[in-house]
Amino acid sequence: MSGFGGMTPAERLEHVPAIEDLSRLAKRRMPHFAWEYLDSGTGFEAAIRRNRDCLDQVLFKPRGLQGEIRPELSTELFGRKYDLPFGMAPVGMTGLMWPGAELMLARSARRTNIPYCLSTVACETPEDVGRTAGENGWFQLYTFADWAINEDLLKRAGDSGFSVLVITVDLPAPSMRERQRRAGLRVPPKITPQFIANVLARPAWALATRKRGKPAFRMLEKYLGGEDMRDLPKFLADQQVGTLYRWKDLARFRKLWKGPIVIKGLLDTEDARCAVEEGMDGIVVSNHGGRQFDGAPASISVLPEIAETVGGKTAIVFDSGVRTGLDVLRALALGADFVLAGRPYLYGAAAHGEAGADHVSHILATDLANNMVQLGVSRLSQLRGLAVA
Ligand SMILES: Cc1cc2nc3c(=O)[nH]c(=O)nc-3n(C[C@H](O)[C@H](O)[C@H](O)COP(=O)(O)O)c2cc1C
């Protein structure tokens, strides 16, 4: 079943109460190679498990008799009011996981009034997504060695209405992603018997892909200089995509982007300090959802020391492993100003289309509000420092 067939949000919650329900259905609807791309980490996937284990270890002592508790979930970030303290993290090749998903997520984010961050390796153009997301659109940049491309991408993003620039710095080289390799996923996709068998096993995906057209890196097509998509891996390698060498390189982006700039993928206090020194408006404390470096600490375990060092000097955004409203609450309590979720929104879109993305926000918001009531707290700002372990 897809799209929830006219159910109210409350009815949806009765049938699909948690993100894991969406992920189970998404797995049944996506081709194996696309599922493995979305769901996997790298190495033994210890960093993914660590994210979960360490989030579960953040505990609170509920207080009773605190008066009537009416949780207020809206929050301000970068001078803009969002209805919820969380948003959608950038996820590359979203359109491979579900055809047209970038536009679905952008519409959902705008309707829910939360941010949607579009990845550099998107299957849609910034022009189309920017128009759809409006001011809720954030733009994520993997840097290119050729500065003309960085400049052009940022001009396109700015002209298309994206309000925040997110520069990701935790992808200095591709990681192993063994599950993805075993599943036969190549960039661009290679049509092998395994690939065809995967697609035939998922007729809803195949049909949606037929309608939307073959997944392609529509954002980057223009820079391939008329070359075939088959040349993409060489292009990405030649461009050292995602590699920035020095903190002072960030100053160049200040001249290219008028709005707030956020550095994504920091786990070290010293790096957070450098981001502040370079005048960055925000940082994302993230281990890339455990996809890049299996020896990384859980993002939540380094959040308190980073918040203690740079809190109040730059906005602190948190991601990696958030699956419940309680996880959002944990991050806010340990010093985050805002939270992002990556995989959950793709599980939602693959399981139930645009309504599935809406439902992810609904699950997280309902659980966040419920847990605030359990704790006896009405305002997000009261969460800071409440964790006992
Ligand atoms: C399939 C996939 C693709 C991703 N692609 C990008 C990307 O293009 N740019 C980026 O900055 N982060 C990317 N990320 C990382 C996410 O932005 C985010 O840090 C991560 O998903 C958070 O963990 P979660 O999935 O457990 O919520 C990707 C994550 C996934 C799962």
Image: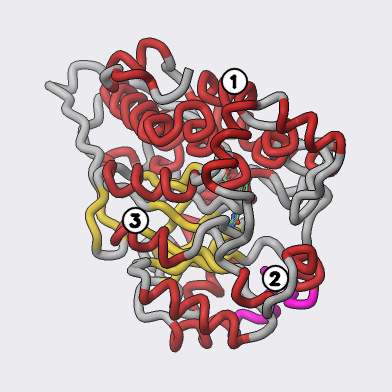
Residue annotated with mark 3: 132
C-alpha span from label 1 to label 3? 29 Å
Residue at 86% of width from left, 41% of height from top? Answer: 192
Residue at 84% of width from left, 41% of height from top? Answer: 184
Q: Nearer the viewer, residue 310 or 170?
A: 170
C-alpha span from label 3 to label 2? 26 Å
Please give the count of numbered marks on the rendered protein: 3
Residue at 41% of width from left, 52% of height from top? Answer: 116
Residue 106 horizontal side relative to residue 349, left or right: left
Q: Which mark is residue 24?
A: 1
Q: Nearer the viewer, residue 207 or 194?
A: 207
Contact between marks 2 and 1 (CB within 8 A): the answer is: no
Residue annotated with mark 2: 241
Residue 52's image quarter? Answer: top right
User: x, y percentage for residue 257?
Assistant: 41, 80
Q: Above or below — where is 32 with respect to 256?
A: above
Tell whether position 246 is magenta. yes
Range drawn in magenta: 238-247
Q: Dominant secondary structure of the magenta stretch?
A: loop
Mark 1, Cα crowd under 10 Å, few <14 / some 14-19 / many 20+, is: few
